[in-house]
Image: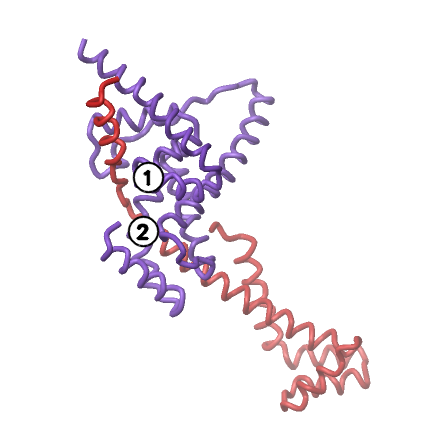
Chain colours: A red, B purple
Amino acid sequence: MTSQEEQWLDNLLADPPSVRDNGFTDQTLHAIKRYKQRRMMVFAGAWSLAFLLVLFVSPWTSLQSWVGVLESSNFSIVAQIKAQIAQSSADQWAALLSDNWAFIFAFLAITLVSLKNVFLSDV
Amino acid sequence: MSFAAGTLETALVLRAQTQQDKQAFSRLVLMHQNKVRSFLLRLSRNAANADDLAQEVFIIAYQKLANFRGSGEFGAWLCSIAYRCFLKHYRKQQRENLARDEFAGNADEGLNPMAADRYESISIEQMALEKALQQLSVAQTAAITLCESFGFSHSEAAAILNQPLGTVKSNVKRGKQKLREKLIGSRQEEQS
């Protein structure tokens, strides 16, 4: 092996061919954008779930004090829930749900969209 | 890397880290996409897989940008993520191939051909080199690419590949020996 051949190989190795972009940079930035959107949706979904849990689960658990905290912030649905729990009949629960269907639907929708983005995303 | 390019890169990394600057990260992707994709193309020997892995590398880099302490070159950090991503993919592919071979009795799929249109421009000699690199082991290809093509020192390559320094030196030496045999042998055949 001559030193000339050694030099030839070293020069060849030191000059690797450039790969064409072929839209790679744009696709990568788009994928990062989708990742950020998904992260935001997960965050929103987690908060929605937590909020729903506080609203619907806490009256029967040790988290009941949260209802008071939320009630003090004049959040009307909490007061309604507390009143319903005091009487706690099936008809009244139905009335509560029907009065607040838009609110509940919005939170459920956000939660479902978040879950869909987490589990069915291609990134 | 020149001093000016290094300074610009440091500034961009700082902006992306502290201000969550999307433009700064975009420029970092643009600056390093060629190096990361070339590295992965040589390792994976498949252009589509290389691009998928490279995209994964940049998403991981974006997620873990706060972990980059600036103790080394940003390109070296990206190459270390790329190598880990590749190994994960490679091991998964090996398991899948093993399962498929057991089922179908097919032991060898062969290598995917390198397409010349993947490159901006490539000479016949460079194409011959890329083909010869396909015949080396993954560890040899990685060590040679980092040390000889990207200009990292042996110790930097050892840190990127998470391998002992002696292993990297040995892989470079043996890999280059094999390349010489293949390339110079084929040149002599062409001349005669």
Name the amino acid, label 1: Ser
Q: Position of residue B152 (x, y in %)?
A: 34, 42
Q: Is residue B191 above or below residue A75?
A: above
Left or right position of B127 against A92: left
Q: In whole angstroms, how far apart are the C-alphas of marks 1 and 2? A: 14 Å
The chain under label 1 reads B
Residue A72 position within the rendered picture, expressed as x and y whole percent measured from the top left: 67, 91
Per the rendering, the mark at residue B38 is: 1
* Residue bearing the label numbered 2: A25
Looking at the image, residue B45 lies above or below residue B191: below
Instruction: In the rendered structure, find residue A45 and report the number of the disc placed on it.
Output: none
Q: Nearer the viewer, mark 1 or mark 2?
A: 1
| Residue drawn at (35%, 44%) of the image | B36
Query: Looking at the picture, does residue B99 appear above or below residue A113?
Result: above
Residue B187 placement: quadrant:
top left
B163 left or right of B50?
right
Picture coordinates of residue A18 (x, y %)?
Answer: 25, 40
B180 and B135: which is toward the camera: B180
* Dot 2: chain letter: A
Q: Quadrant of the N terminus of chain A?
A: top left
Q: Position of residue B51 (x, y in %)?
A: 37, 42
